[in-house]
Image (cartoon, rainbow, N blue to C red):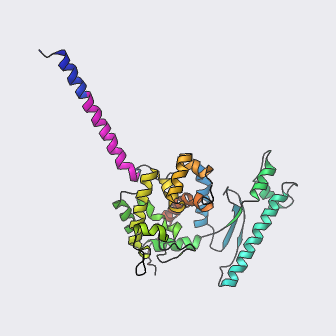
């Protein structure tokens, strides 16, 4: 006859074995999702819906010669659009900059004036309608400090989609090989418009716009070779960067943000605010301004518009860059 103590030990061992199997299964699932975040790696938060919509219009609606005058923090507030011819030389660029400055100052003065008097013209009425409530005067005063201009990019973005045809299949395959979301391959629409040899004002270059400091961590950069200009090598570098940033942050919207803002700053922001929507809404530093705050929204918008344009037969032909 089996002793009751032995029975209890057997039951206990079986329970421990089942628990271990369950935990192993959960751990395996977590590991599988670490980099890919299988379900919706790039969520559209309600906090950024208006920003994504704004950038979708920048990429798909507003032409290259359109200047959008808007509120820097609330992208729903588009005050006006003006058309400026594409500059042919330095003098043209200076003229356009003067006109942009004039239109910016016009709306700054209008917003300040509307604090103390009712709107007079149809244009003033349209602008005044953005501001309601008992703190209307304070809203207008703050808005006067946030007037910004943005160039439309419709033609530029369509050309970017044409160029991307030569690279996207390979880029997506590279990201999959690192167990990363393949849609990261759409980020160059924001960074470089898929120009392989473009340089920025701060010295970043190539399709992925690596700075020298960051690039040296992943690529060969010396007097003879600059792998930032190699589309394939730099995409492997981007994949290694995103693998590292995701391992630190465990969150794709923040990992994308870190590509513009920097990983150390993004880690600090996450520690303070925990979630991406709170970082977006509350985090402000000298280096976390309009560009960094909007970077993830721009990525989502670029991905959405590019996927729509890829269905256009006239844009499907791959086009190599010089």
Q: Is residue 164 above or below residue 290?
A: below
Residue at 34%, 44% (x, y): give it: 29
Bounds of the magenta span? 15-36
The residue closer to the viewer here, 242 or 193, is: 242
Picture quadrant of residue 99: bottom right
- Residue at 78 percent of width and 63 percent of height: 108
Asked if residue 307 shows in the view, the reply is yes
User: Can you say which quadrant of the picture contains the N terminus?
Assistant: top left
Q: Which residue is at 70% across, 64% downward?
A: 148
26 displayed left or right of 273: left
29 left or right of 13 in image: right
Q: Is residue 20 magenta?
A: yes
At 50% from the left and 61% from the top, the residue drawn is: 259
Residue 4 lies in quadrant:
top left
Q: Is residue 80 magenta?
A: no
On screen, residue 261 versus residue 119, left or right, reads left
223, 133: nearer the viewer: 223
x and y percentages locating residue 14 in the rendered image: 23, 28
**How far across and down, in percent of the image, does residue 318 sit?**
43, 75
Q: Vertical placement of 168 versus 8: above or below?
A: below
Q: Position of residue 282 (x, y in %)?
A: 62, 49
Q: How many marks on residues?
A: 0
Left or right, 161 with reference to 233: right
Visible residue check, residue 210:
no
Dominant SS in magenta: helix
The x and y percentages for residue 104 are 75, 67
């Amino acid at each position: 006859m089996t002793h009751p103590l032995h029975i209890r030990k057997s039951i206990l061992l079986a329970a421990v074995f089942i628990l271990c199997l369950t935990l192993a299964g959960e751990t395996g699932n977590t590991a599988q999702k670490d980099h890919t975040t299988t379900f919706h790696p790039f969520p559209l938060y309600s906090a950024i819906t208006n920003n994504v919509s704004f950038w979708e219009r920048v990429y798909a609606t507003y032409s290259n010669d359109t200047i959008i005058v808007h509120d820097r923090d609330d992208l729903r507030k588009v005050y006006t659009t003006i058309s400026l011819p594409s500059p042919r030389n330095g003098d043209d660029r200076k003229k356009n900059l003067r006109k942009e400055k004039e239109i910016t100052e016009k709306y700054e003065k209008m917003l300040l004036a509307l604090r103390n008097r009712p709107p007079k013209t149809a244009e003033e009425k349209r602008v005044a309608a953005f501001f309601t409530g008992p703190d209307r005067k304070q809203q207008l005063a703050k808005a006067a400090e946030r007037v910004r201009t943005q160039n439309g990019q419709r033609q530029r973005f369509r050309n970017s989609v044409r160029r991307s045809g030569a690279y996207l299949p390979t880029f997506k395959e590279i990201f999959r090989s690192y167990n990363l979301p393949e849609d990261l391959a759409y980020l160059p629409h924001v960074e470089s418009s898929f120009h392989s040899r473009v340089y920025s004002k701060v010295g970043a270059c190539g399709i992925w716009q690596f700075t020298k400091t960051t690039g040296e961590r992943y690529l060969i950069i010396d007097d003879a070779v600059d792998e930032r200009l190699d589309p394939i090598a730099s995409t492997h570098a981007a994949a290694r960067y995103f693998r590292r940033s995701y391992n630190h942050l465990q969150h794709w919207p923040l990992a994308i943000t870190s590509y513009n803002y920097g990983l150390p700053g993004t880690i600090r922001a996450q520690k303070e605010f925990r979630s991406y929507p709170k970082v977006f809404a509350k985090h402000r530093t000298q280096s976390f301004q309009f560009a960094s705050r909007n970077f993830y929204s721009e990525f989502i918008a670029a991905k959405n518009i590019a996927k729509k344009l890829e269905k256009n037969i006239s844009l499907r032909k791959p086009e190599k860059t010089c």
